[in-house]
Image: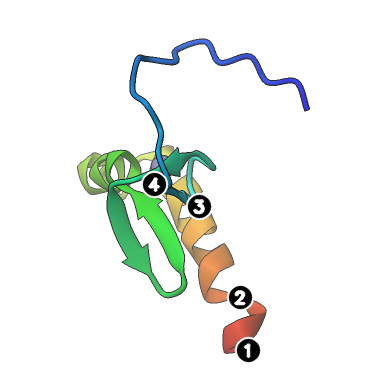
Amino acid sequence: MEVEILNSNSLQKSLGETCIVCDEEKELGIHLYTSFICRDCEKEMTNTPTSDPKYQYYLDKLRRVKNSPLYS
Ligand SMILES: [Zn+2]
């Protein structure tokens, strides 16, 4: 997998969890069901008005979580 990290910063990652929204490993965040949402994405979501198309994108991500086989 070749991924070019364009805006990598100096933040050193230790053991984090993979955010379901941005698919990055983050240490800080919240848990939703069995999934993890990093603080950045959580903040983004809270700041995104429901009328914003981006909000739908987040909802889709969350729906994916709720549709987890674990809960079917
Ligand atoms: Zn995230």
> Disc 4 beta carbon < 8 A from ligand 1?
no
On residue 55, which mark appears?
Answer: 4
Circles 1 and 2: CB distance less than 8 Å? yes
- In three-dimensional space, the C-alpha distance between marks 1 and 4, rounded to whole angstroms, equals 25 Å
- In three-dimensional space, the C-alpha distance between marks 3 and 2, rounded to whole angstroms, equals 12 Å
Query: What amino acid is found at the position of numbered circle 1 in the picture?
Result: Ser
Query: What amino acid is found at the position of numbered circle 2 in the picture?
Result: Ser
Expressed as whole percent of the image width and height from the top left, the position of residue 58 reads: 44, 50
Look at 50% across and 52% down and name the residue there.
Answer: 20
Q: Mark 3 = which residue?
A: 20
Query: What amino acid is found at the position of numbered circle 3 in the picture?
Result: Ile
Expressed as whole percent of the image width and height from the top left, the position of residue 19 reads: 46, 49
Q: Earlier in the sequence, mark 3 or mark 4?
A: 3
Q: Mark 2 = which residue?
A: 68
Q: Mark 1 = which residue?
A: 72
Query: What amino acid is found at the position of numbered circle 4 in the picture?
Result: Tyr
Q: Earlier in the sequence, mark 1 or mark 3?
A: 3
